[in-house]
Amino acid sequence: QVQLVESGGGLVQAGNSLRLSCVPSGRSLGSYVMGWFRQIPGEERQFVAAITFGGTKTAYADSVKGRFTISRDNDKRTMYLQMRSLKSEDTAVYFCAADLSWRTLTTTPVECEYWGQGTQVTVSS
């Protein structure tokens, strides 16, 4: 019954920054791990970043390490993806996801219990 809602996407120039947000509707997700994925038309959805409930453990795709930062504010029930030094290849629809299992989120995300509908990020050069 829980839905995830992404926001913050838009059109930005290469080198600039953008922050995405993900908020669950309905009941709280409790201790779920959460993450971000992105999909380019014609390609498979790819892992971007993940974070545990407490925020002490994070993981990033190699392509975004050093540029993107995942975080969450449980009091606000919000997960964030701070994207810096954006490149044209970052252009994609970005989705947030949540699951009870870190392994599921990072290895078989198609099985994640909750997904958002995505927000478009377009980086122009």
Image (spheres, rainbow, N blue to C red):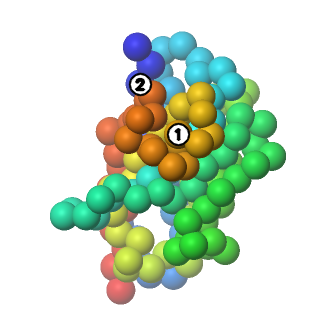
Q: Amino acid at mark 1?
A: Thr
Q: Residue at x 66, y 46 (%)?
A: 51
Quarter of the image for the C terminus: give it. bottom left
Dot label at residue 104: 1
Q: Is residue 104 above or below residue 14?
A: above
Q: Is residue 103 above or below residue 32?
A: below
Q: Report the front residue among 83 and 48.
A: 48
The residue pinned by badge 2 equals 3
Q: Which element type, helix, strand or loop, lies under badge 2?
A: strand
Q: Where residue 37 sits in the image (x, y, percent)?
A: 44, 53
Q: Is residue 13 above or below residue 97?
A: below
Task: Give me the C-alpha separation between circle 1 and circle 2.
Answer: 18 Å
**Is residue 86 rendered to the left or right of residue 65?**
left
Q: Where residue 79 sits in the image (x, y, percent)?
A: 60, 41
Q: How many marks on residues? A: 2
Q: Is residue 66 above or below residue 53?
A: below
Q: Residue at x 40, y 47 (%)?
A: 95
Q: Where residue 88 sits in the image (x, y, percent)?
A: 37, 79
Q: For mark 1, does the 10 Å Cα neighbourhood hold few (<14), some (14 to 19), or many (20 or more) residues?
A: some
Question: Splitting the image into 4 quarters, where does residue 84 fall?
Answer: bottom right
Image marks 1 and 2: residues in contact by CB distance under 8 Å: no
Q: Which element type, helix, strand or loop, lies under badge 1?
A: helix
Q: Residue at x 54, y 31 (%)?
A: 99
